[in-house]
Image (tube, rainbow, N blue to C red):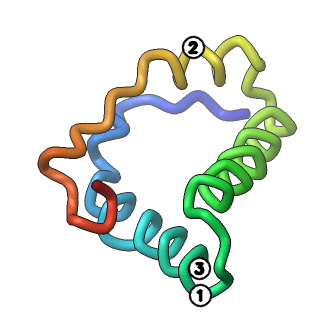
Amino acid sequence: MSTYQGHRVEDHQDFIFNQLLPSIVGYARDSGTPSEVVAFASFLSLATILHSKGVPRATIIAAMDAARVPTHLAPEVVQ
């Protein structure tokens, strides 16, 4: 995996809140699946891709533990 430098998670906040999360919630609603199930399936898929690209499991777990999504500023679909 190439080193990820000069970028922050916050740099992608618009994409996450305006495209990714609404897509997950919309798919969940359309398929009659709880949104947390779809979100978890998405997370597992992405974590698997990251791990296969060389991100250690410990790094993925540490990132989960450190993540704090400011939902009070997020679109209503996220809250």
The answer to whether marks 1 and 3 mark residues whose Cβ atoms lie closer than 8 Å is: yes
Mark 1 crowdedness (10 Å alpha carbons): few <14, some 14-19, many ≥20 = few
Residue sitting at the far left? 73
Of residues 23 and 54, the one drawn nearer to the viewer in this rendering: 23
Instruction: Give me the residue at 71% from left, 12% from top.
Output: 58
Q: Amino acid at mark 1?
A: Asp
Q: Quadrant of residue 61?
A: top right
Mark 3 residue type:
Tyr
Q: Amino acid at mark 2?
A: Ala
Mark 3 vs 2, N-terminal side: 3
- Return the residue found at the far right: 52
* Residue 39, placed above or below residue 28: above
SS at mark 1 in the image = helix
Give the structural element (helix, strand or loop) at label 2.
helix
- Estimate how packed mark 2 is, as few (under 14), some (14 to 19) or many (20 or more) residues with alpha carbons within 10 Å: few
The residue that mark 2 highlights is: 62
Q: Which residue is mark 3?
A: 27
Residue placed under numbered mark 1 in the picture: 30
Query: Which quadrant of the rendered structure holds the N terminus?
Result: top right
Left or right for 76, reference 20: left
Q: Is residue 71 left or right of residue 28?
A: left
In the image, taking residue 44 as reference, residue 72 lies left or right, namely left
